[in-house]
Image: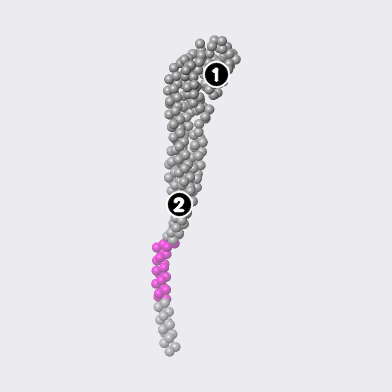
Amino acid sequence: MSYAVISALSNERFTLCNPRLNVPIVAGVSLLPVSRDNEHVLTRIMGGKAVSETEAVSRLIGAVGAATDHVAAQTSAGQDAAKHLRAALKAAQAAAEEGDARPAEELANEARDAIQRAGLDHRLAGRADDIADALDQCADVIRFDPEPIRKALEAHEKAEAGHQKTLATLAGIVSDASAAADRARSSEVLAKVANADHEDRLSRTVTHDFLAGLVKDRDDAARALRRLSDRLAVLGSVVR
């Protein structure tokens, strides 16, 4: 007796009992052999083919592996984005301390976009979950050894855990960048920036040359006052 492989059903959710073949099917592969009476239905009506137990198990492992590869690829993309964004976060936080919220706001938006790009194709990634559910529900009736498939499922679970961790990292960057943008608009930072701006204008105005000019003007004024005093004294003696 052979197992069924039906490509047209490879994207379908787990079916406990296919109405035409009377067997459970997941990822387009039957979990039980197809009876000889139904083999013609499989090949001629459903466009499938009969395969050995070994190939059926191999195809299920391959379906899990494809889901795992997808999760791993999305995780890698998310990690690359997180590395770039984390490096830019310090500069955005520094700008926020100077009252500039724009870099932090842009960074938060970039991190949100990165989360979207690192998201999973749930139909593809979910195929592993479907296979896990199918093995659990059919544990008492399947005839092949499910352990090789379960090992592949364990690797998939680890990959998903890594993916969730990466998404959490990106979400943390969104939070940190948003907090920096809020900080830039806070009364404390605005007051600090205003004071710094005042001090900057003062320092640019009161230069060494400016102070030297003040001293010169003071000395010139003192001399002029003395001359005026002398002339007034002369005028006073004449009047008397």
Q: Residues within 10 Å of mark 2 (few under 14, many from 20)?
A: some
Residue 152 quadrant: top left
Q: Nearer the viewer, residue 52 or 234?
A: 52
Q: Nearer the viewer, residue 234 or 59?
A: 59
**Where's residue 240, x and y in %?**
43, 89
Q: Which residue is mark 1?
A: 17
Contact flag, marks 2 and 1 (Cβ < 8 Å): no
The residue under the point 52% across, 17% down is 30
Residue 20, how many percent across, how many down?
58, 16
Disc with the residue nearer the chain's start (2 vs 1): 1
Q: Is residue 124 left or right of residue 230?
A: right
Question: How many discs appear?
Answer: 2
Magenta segment, principal secondary structure?
A: helix
Vertical relation: 8 (above or below) 99: above
Between residues 209 and 193, which one lies in front from this camera angle? 193
Observer-side mark, 2 or 1, equals: 1
Q: Is residue 63 visible?
A: no
- In the rendered view, does 40 fall on the left or right side of 239? right
Residue extending farthest front? 140
Residue 219 shown in magenta: yes
Mark 2–mark 1 Cα distance, whole angstroms, equals 65 Å
Residue at the (48%, 16%) spot, across then down: 141
Three-letter residue code for mark 2: Glu
Residue bearing the label numbered 2 = 98
Q: Amino acid at mark 1?
A: Cys
Q: Outermost residue toward the bottom? A: 240
For the record, the magenta segment spans: 205-224
